[in-house]
Image (cartoon, helix red, strand yellow):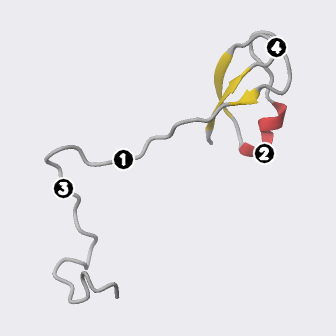
Amino acid sequence: MPIFDFKCRQCGHSFDIMIPNADKDKVRCPECGAPHPTQLLSSFNTARPGPGVSKPAPDGCSGCAAAGTGG
């Protein structure tokens, strides 16, 4: 289930909530109870190898004759 960030239009309280996408229109401010807070643009995390860490090749691809040919 995704986590969405919101900001209340009435009291200005910023908060996040884990809720199904279909239920975002039912969110109320946890501070003042106002309906329909503004949804904020949320950042997301992607896993990336750090320095000195190499990504392993997918199974069956090391030394494959089609490597680098696009096919």
Q: Secondary structure at mark 1?
A: loop
The percent coordinates of residue 24 (x first, y second) are 77, 37
Number of marks drawn: 4
Q: Quadrant of the C terminus?
A: bottom left
The mark that comes first in sequence, 4 or 1, is: 4
The percent coordinates of residue 31 (x first, y second) are 75, 10
Mark 2–mark 4 distance (CA, rounded to whole Å) = 23 Å
Q: Secondary structure at mark 4?
A: loop
Q: What numbered label is drawn on residue 47?
A: 1
Reading the image, the residue beneath label 2 is 22
Q: Are marks 2 and 3 in contact (CB under 8 Å)?
A: no
Reading the image, the residue beneath label 4 is 10
Q: Quadrant of residue 35 in the image?
A: top right
Say above or below: 52 vs 42: below
Is residue 38 left or right of 54 when viewed as pictured?
A: right
Reading the image, the residue beneath label 3 is 54
Is residue 43 left or right of 58 when viewed as pictured?
A: right
Q: Secondary structure at mark 3?
A: loop
Q: Secondary structure at mark 2?
A: helix
Label 3 crowding class (10 Å Cα cut-off): few <14, some 14-19, many 20+? few
Label 4 crowding class (10 Å Cα cut-off): few <14, some 14-19, many 20+? few
The percent coordinates of residue 34 (x first, y second) are 85, 17
Is residue 36 left or right of 41 when viewed as pictured?
A: right
Mark 4–mark 1 distance (CA, rounded to whole Å) = 37 Å
